Image (cartoon, rainbow, N blue to C red):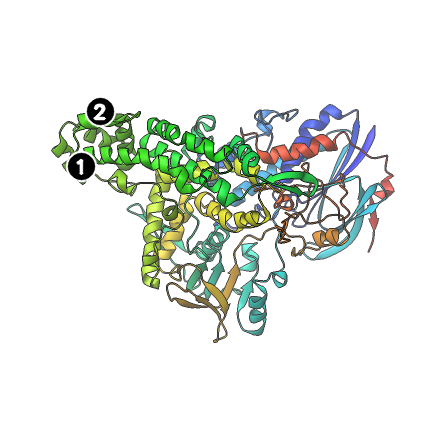
Amino acid sequence: MRKVRLAVVGAGPTCTYVVERLAATLPDLADELALDIHVFDRGGRFGAGAVHSDTQPETSFLNRIVGQVAFAADESVLDAGPLLEPSLRPTLYEWCRRRFDETGDPVFDVTKEDWPKRYVHGLALREVFGWYVDILRAQPHVDVHLHQAEVLDVTERGERLEVEVRAVDDDGGPGSSEVVTVDSVLFLTGHSWNDASRIARLRPLLRFAEDHDVELVPTAYPLEDTLTERVAPPGSAVGCAGMGLTTIDVILWLTEGRGGRFDRTEGRLTYQPSGREPATIVPVSEAGLFTFARPYNAKQVDLERFEHRGVFLTESAVDRLRASVGRPTSVGLTGAQRQLDFTEHLFPLVLLEMAHLYYVTLLGPDVGRRLAEAVGPTVDTALDNPAGPRTPEALLDPVSSVLGAAVTLIDGVLQGTVPHVEARAATDGWSLDAALSRFLEVTVGPVARDALLARVDDPAGLAEEFARARRPWGHQPLLSDNLFDWRSTISPVPPADRTSPERYQAAVVEFMRRDHLWAEQDNLTNPAKAAADGVWRDLRPVLGYAVDYGGLTAASHREFLTVYMRHHNRLANGAALEVMEKILALVECGIVDVSVGPDVTVAGGPGGRFQVNGPHTGAVRELDVLVDARVHSFDPELDTAPLYRRLLDRGLVRKWRNPAEDGDHFEPGGLDLTVDFHPVRRDGTVDRRLTFLGPPSEGVMFFQLGALRPHHNHHVMRDVLTWLREFLPRGGAPVAEEDVATPVG
């Protein structure tokens, strides 16, 4: 029997998925393998980790509906191996329903489409992790050791590895140290934080805070520790650098988390302060906008049917572009790669895909088919001809041609200027009645639609009733006023509304109200939400296929992460409608100030406080506290923990580089890893004893984060299986028990 010793560094959600796969697989290997598993987590919240801890505030929500979170492999996962019985692999929804039946606690009383509180996810992770550990410990030759300890270093000892760890005492301080000898180390460290003194944009702010009576909070989490009433007292002015999910968590923690209350009156939330809040919270970002509200997920009823599959933005389209216009380059161990430019080659396809899905949603599949036919020859030329048309304007021109006719006919019928019978005869390959019915269903709803369609042969009566119709989701009346436009999609506040703080704030409030109506309509009925969700979320694997392993040139890769990922986050990775309604209520009551606008600067001010300047609006705001509320990207040189710097310094790992002919190479921050997640060392060799999943692979790969999804053959589980299939056949020689833990101090 082989004896294998495994160290797992980090005990968050991915660790739960790993332990689940081991629990399902090892019983079949009981006579072949003896396994010692050592799991290390500094916070000791085994199964949940720090970011998904079950102890975090009740004001923070998970960014995934409850029906789309899983903990275990299911039948959808290709070559998953043995599956646990269904009761041991519930979705988060099923787990919540069980817990509600047991406790009656309303926090667990959810539907599949609800957005759960983040601590609930943590509770579930902790419980199912315990189930899987119990299964493993019941095996005759498996030992599981859970260490509340920080891993400080990993060093080589011949064929084995020594893991240097320092225990954490009951008060969270450093305890005793030890060395654990293992055969393999699986790094599941999850989100990490960067040292503010090593970040160029934070360094001057940190020095200013040290010299003045102001607070710089370099990372927001854990909120209950970093943003106490001592740090951000009632009546203070707090700024947040960033307007994404972290800032939203901060805002709710400083308001609702301090006893404030939200009430719903006539369908709209209002906020009742507790008196313990900051006087003002000023969120700032380049765009000057929060992430947009995530829509009600109507796809959940049948994901196989409703999740979008690309028409133009496909893996085969990426392959055709590489063949015709890809730039030959050698990228690390990947070797030959034909790199693309995202803006020039891929973004036009993204916009075309969005426009097509937008119009399928707004006018129905019949018009969508006609649009695809019209644009098909242009797309083929763009993909296969090096000199072919590839600008957004060139690809969208055939769409505009078909839409022009639709606008003339549909708006003419609705305004009573084009007789219905003439409009029906004038269409070219699409059904006027189907398109008209769908347009009215989207803009006025099915009941009003039926009433209007009953009057299509009465032009004057139809026009009069159409003008009076209520539009519950904030759509404009005519088709010509509801056309897809990328610029207004990503930048909905026009320059004319950026000329003063008051005007900008009013425009942001107006946009948020409209955005919330669109989110309420859902991601299958609202054209804007359908296009954003269907392309930037459902087709994210296609984007990864284009970007991963040096798929873009160095310059384009840099632009993709700094520009297009921000578009992605704002359009499709925002918070739930319920959460964004709270943010809007806080803006309307005056606690949250969004009036400074876009492109702000933040620096030390002459009065000894941080100062925010809005170059477009002219707004100037002074702050007592500044929170860096941006998610820190992984970078071993910047990490607050010493582990990755030590691995880097000794050459066990190296950073991945996207090379450039002009020498302007791009290093996103992640590690140089093989396709099976093993590190490339400084000398160019690969160490297959070490495996890194999650954020350390960001850079060489795209968007490796995310909770496991059920019924989806999800990439997170496929990554775990990539490790597992190699790990189980491998083993080490028998190891003496006295070698397992050797004190070092």
Mark 2: few, some, or many residues within 10 Å (few <14, many ≥20)? few
Please provide percent x and percent y for residue 144. Answer: 73, 37
Image quarter hosting the C terminus? bottom right
Residue at image location 54% in from the left, 41% down from the top: 121
Camera-side mark, 1 or 2: 2
**Based on the displayed image, in which of its 4 quarters is residue 420 positioned?**
top left
Dots 1 and 2: beta carbons under 8 Å?
Answer: no
Residue at image location 57% in from the left, 39% down from the top: 326
Does the image show residue 61?
A: no
Mark 1: few, some, or many residues within 10 Å (few <14, many ≥20)? many
Q: Which residue is mark 2?
A: 425
Q: Secondary structure at mark 1?
A: helix
Please provide percent x and percent y for residue 30. Answer: 76, 25
Q: Which residue is mark 1?
A: 415
Q: Up-down: is 481 above or below 210?
A: above
**Based on the displayed image, in which of its 4 quarters is residue 142 positioned?**
top right
The CA span between labels 1 and 2 is 18 Å
